[in-house]
Structure formats: C-alpha cells, structure tokens
C-alpha cells in the first residue's frame, strides 16, 4: 500500500513538473515566446485560416481562397485530425496551448506505461523519471502525437504481441492516427514494426496474426484519415506538385554525408528533437563500461544503440549524390522524404536512457546517486530548451508581437475594402502574419501546392532572383515551399523587425505581374527607396509598441 502511494506521489510530482514546463503559456498568454520555425511562421496561421474558411469539411475539389488565389483544400490537412478540429473549435492561441498540453501529458503517460511494463518493471521511480524527461522534449507542435505518441502506440503493440492486450490497447491504435501524421513518422514506425514481425515469423517461426492484424488496422485507419493526401497523389492527375522539382540530391561529398550522420546521432534533428548529447549519450557509454567491468552483456542496450546508428547513417546519406540513378528510375523517391526514420529517435533514445540508468543503478549505492543526478541534469537541460527560453534568446518576438493583430486591424480599416476583394504580398516578414490577420495573400508557406502557381509567382521577382544565386537556387529547388518575395540584399530576410534600421535601395519587382495575379498591396517591413520606379505608391507607415514590425504599406499603381 505504501509503495502504491509512493508511486502516485512520483506521478503527481512529474505532472506538476510538466505543468511548470508549460506554465509560460498559461501565465504569459500571448506574451509568451513560442517556436518560430515551421510553427508560427506557417503552421499556426494555416490552421487558423482553414478553420475560418468554412472549408474544414470541404469537398475534394474545394479551395481555400485566402491563400495563393485559392489553395486546394486537400493540401491543408484532414478534418479527421484532432489538431485541425482544435483550431476549428477554439481561438488559435487556446488551441495551440491545448494541443501542446495534450502532447506533453500523453507523452508522459505513454512512456511511463511502456517502461513500467516492459523495461523497468522493478524500478517504478526510474520509470517515472525517464518518462518525465521524454515528456519535456520540445515537441514540434504541428506534429501532434507523431513523436509524443510513439511510446503509447508501442506499448499497445507490445501488449498485443505478448497476448496480454485489453480492449484499450486496440483503442489506442485506433485513435492515435487521428492525432498524428503518417508521412512524418508512423509510416516508418509501422514499417519497423512489420520488419520485427517478419523476423519473428521467418527466423523464430512465430506467426502472431493478432499482432499483424493490429498493424494493418492502424495502417488502414491512417489511410482513411489521410484520404485527401492519397487523393492528391493517386487520383488527381491534373495536380502537379512543386515537389516534382525537389532536388534528387543535396550532398556531393562523402565527408559531408558522414558529418551529417554523426551530427544526427549526437544532436538529433529539429523536428524530432531528442536532446541526447549532454546526458543520455554519456550515460549509455558509462552503462556499457559498467556492464563490461561486471562481465554482463547488455544486448538490448547495444541493439538499440545499433539501430539508432543505422537510422542516422540512413538519414545522412539519403540526399547523397550516389542515390541519383535509383531516384531517376523511381521518380516517386524524389518527392517523398524517406530519411524520416529519424523521427523514431526520441523513442529509441529514451528507452536507451532507461536501460543505461538501470545498469548504472544496479551497480551499487553510488550508482543510485549517479542515476538521480543524471535524471536531474537531463530534466534541467530540457527545461533550458523550453521554447520560452530558446526563442527569447534568439530574439524571436512573442506570439502577440509576431502576429500584431491590432496593428493589422488598423491597416485593414485604413485600406477600407473587404479583404476578399484584394490580394497582398509581404517583404521582410512572413506571409503567415497577414494570413493570420485575415488578409488574402499571394505568398505563403505551403509544403504542397501546384507547380504552375510557383512558376507564375516567380515572375514577380525573377529579376531579383537573378541578382542572387543563393535565393535563385533556394526558391527554384530547395525552398519552393516558401513561396515568398525574396530580396537579394537581405539574407534570410523574413524577420526584419522594427529594430532593423535599414532600407531596400533597389528592389527589382515586376508590379505588372503582381497586379496580373491580383496583388494590390505590398506589406514591407522595410522602406523601399525605389518604390516609385517599380510601380509602388507608399500609402502609410504603421507601427505600434505591441508589434514587432514597422509596416510600410504600398499600393500597386
């Protein structure tokens, strides 16, 4: 009874730590600093626009008019995804906070259940500690349970494999697809699960049909949830994606590929961060040394380290030049990023962490103190990587400052027309900002849209791209997803906040093409000194204390 009470105290303490980790969002509200990259610079605004467009449940042929003169609804996520429904049901910031809270709590629950039953049966406190560490990872918000839900899914699969499953295990596998992504992570998760099943079926001669049925069930639910994506790929021959122009390789030298392998193994990758470099890797090394001294063979730990290494090698070499002949034979491989096995790394690294700490703990009294210190150090490291700290250090504006809603309301009132009757483009700031505030934009951050539109938009800034080999290559090959107006003088120029006291001296902009596509206004974060020469008329400059931007409003003459 006492042990049970202690376990509940451990869990309660862990939940309290998770809430403390999330507290900036609750205490500061929209004054909190949140992740910029692939988050508020695109994903959040897209979800808000979709939620307000009336097309959440639109037909297969419907479009969202706010973006790119009518972006295909099918490119914006399924209405069966919980995150889409959160933005449909709540205001954007509320949906954002609810989403992150669910992700971190379910990450803790899944990892705790997994470790307690299968890896740390006799070490309850250690299971709670490692689960807490996993739950404090800086999960990519748009991913939902793509990383955070993997331990829960693995727990359910292992129960079914061991034939100790309950109805809730099947329910877990049924529900996870509604809050995660097949193309980001679970296609690779299910592939690895299938390889494991084949190994046991062919080598061990153990045919577990219930386990196989569970994989097929989850895969089928994913296909149903992602029906819009499947329609675009297989059943809409008229849709030619920008992804058809993605490069077949990005790395020419073996040394560069090897360096990417090493970096991925040591530091992980942004969208699926595992933050293993400071504590987990040294702990694993220490555990191997201890096991060697005690003449033990930690096969599971070694096996997991081997798998993570193989995944890093695959990640590092996927865009290596040597793949080109194969990708040319199978064009589909050029459009699909099969390097994403690294999305399994957080799950693997924290099981490795659990196994390493178990070996260290069982080494004696000193080992127990060392384990406690390592857990505290990793939790502290994770807190240090909280978005509120990292984004503030990078100088990223707060959520409120970034979207600057009040100032954009003033701009809309100044223009005085219905927002659906004109189109805008942005310079020096992310178009997600104007989209978030109800403006209809020609520019956008979209991972999948018609190639024809990209070529038309390019004509607006063709002369500007000719001045910059970097931006020409970035837009034409690597960065078509960011359909932005790039300016040669401004490297990575989408964060020109009002403290940047510079101006654009010579902008090469085809205002005729801009007007042809419906563009009537340019929102520039910087003064365009040759505006009259390129057919732009400065109307007014807007600036407010709560806005990160000084916006020069230009009208296309």
Image: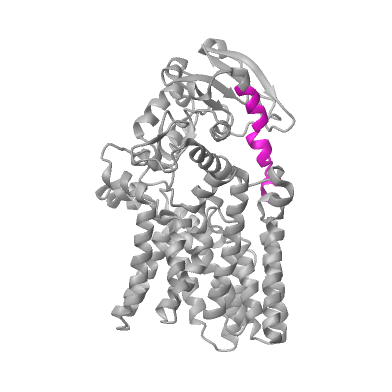
Position of the N terminus by quadrant: bottom right
x then y, percent, for residue 465 = 46, 26
Left or right of 339 on screen, residue 234: left
- The answer to whether residue 215 is left or right of residue 45 is left
Looking at the rendering, the stretch of residues picked out in magenta corresponds to 390-412
Residue at 56% x, 58% y: name it.
273
Residue at left offset 59%, top offset 18%: 415
Residue 108 placement: quadrant: bottom right
Residue 520 in the image: above or below residue 389? above
Left or right: residue 284 versus residue 26 is left
Q: Is residue 201 visible?
A: yes
Dominant SS type (magenta): helix
Residue 219 percent location from the top left of the image:
36, 62
Q: Magenta segment: does it hold 494?
A: no
Say above or below: 81 vs 361.
above
Return the x and y of residue 462 as percentages of the image width and height.
43, 23
Front-most of residues 274 and 314? 274
Q: In this rendering, does residue 505 appear at all?
A: no
Q: In this view, does 311 lie above or below 494?
A: below
Residue 385 rendering spot, x and y as whole percentages: 66, 55
Residue 112 to residue 423: above or below: below
Indicate the colouring scheme: one colour
Depth check: give the residue in front, 193 or 25: 25
Say how many tags the image has. 0
Residue sitting at 71 percent across and 30 percent down?
499
| Quarter where residue 397 is shown | top right
Magenta-drawn stretch contains 404: yes
């Amino acid at each position: 009874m006492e042990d049970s009470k202690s376990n509940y105290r451990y869990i309660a303490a862990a939940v309290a730590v998770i809430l403390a980790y999330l507290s900036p969002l609750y205490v500061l509200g929209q004054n909190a600093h949140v992740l910029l990259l692939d988050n508020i610079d695109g994903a959040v605004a897209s979800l808000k626009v979709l939620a307000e467009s009336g097309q959440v449940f639109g037909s297969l042929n419907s479009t969202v008019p706010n973006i790119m003169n009518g972006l295909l609804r099918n490119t914006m996520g399924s209405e069966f995804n919980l995150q889409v429904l959160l933005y449909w049901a709540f205001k954007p910031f509320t949906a954002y906070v609810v989403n992150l809270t669910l992700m971190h709590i379910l990450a803790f629950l899944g990892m705790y259940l997994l470790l307690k039953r299968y890896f740390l049966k006799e070490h309850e406190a250690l299971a709670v500690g490692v689960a807490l560490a996993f739950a404090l990872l800086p999960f990519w918000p748009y991913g939902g349970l793509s990383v955070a839900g993997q331990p829960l899914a693995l727990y359910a699969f292992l129960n079914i494999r061991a034939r100790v499953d309950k109805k809730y295990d099947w329910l877990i596998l049924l529900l996870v697809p509604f809050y995660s992504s097949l193309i980001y992570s679970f296609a690779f998760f299910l592939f690895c699960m299938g390889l494991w099943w084949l190994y046991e079926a062919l080598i061990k001669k153990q045919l577990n049909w219930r386990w196989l049925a569970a994989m097929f069930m989850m895969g089928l639910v994913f296909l149903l949830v992602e029906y819009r994506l499947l329609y675009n790929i297989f059943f809409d021959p008229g849709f030619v994606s920008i992804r058809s122009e993605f490069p077949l390789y990005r790395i020419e030298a073996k040394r560069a590929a090897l360096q990417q392998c090493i970096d991925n193994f040591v530091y992980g990758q942004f969208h699926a961060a595992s933050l293993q470099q400071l504590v987990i890797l040294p702990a694993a090394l220490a555990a191997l040394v201890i096991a060697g001294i005690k003449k033990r063979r930690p096969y599971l730990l070694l096996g997991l380290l081997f798998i993570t290494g193989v995944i890093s090698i695959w990640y590092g070499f996927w865009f290596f030049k040597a793949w080109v002949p194969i990708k040319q034979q199978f064009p589909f491989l050029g459009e699909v990023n099969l390097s994403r096995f690294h999305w399994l790394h957080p799950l693997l690294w924290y099981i490795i962490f659990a196994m390493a700490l178990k070996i260290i703990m069982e080494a004696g009294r000193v080992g127990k103190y060392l384990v406690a210190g390592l857990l505290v150090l990793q939790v502290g490291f994770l807190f240090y990587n909280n978005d509120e700290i990292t984004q503030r250090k990078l100088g990223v504006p707060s959520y409120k400052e970034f979207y600057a809603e009040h100032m954009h309301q003033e701009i809309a009132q100044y223009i005085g027309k219905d927002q659906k009757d004109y189109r805008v483009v942005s310079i020096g700031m992310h178009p997600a900002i104007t989209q978030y505030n109800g403006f209809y934009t020609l520019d956008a951050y979209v991972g999948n849209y018609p190639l024809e539109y990209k070529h038309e938009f390019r004509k607006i800034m063709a002369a500007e791209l000719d001045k910059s080999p970097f931006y020409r290559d970035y837009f034409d090959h690597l960065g078509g997803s960011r359909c932005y107006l790039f300016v040669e003088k401004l490297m990575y120029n989408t964060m020109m906040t009002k403290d940047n006291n510079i101006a654009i001296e010579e902008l090469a902009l085809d205002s005729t093409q801009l007007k042809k596509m419906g563009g009537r206004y340019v929102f520039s974060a910087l003064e365009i000194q040759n505006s009259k020469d390129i057919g732009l008329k400065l109307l007014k400059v807007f600036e407010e204390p709560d806005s990160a931007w000084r916006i020069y409003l230009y009208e296309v003459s």
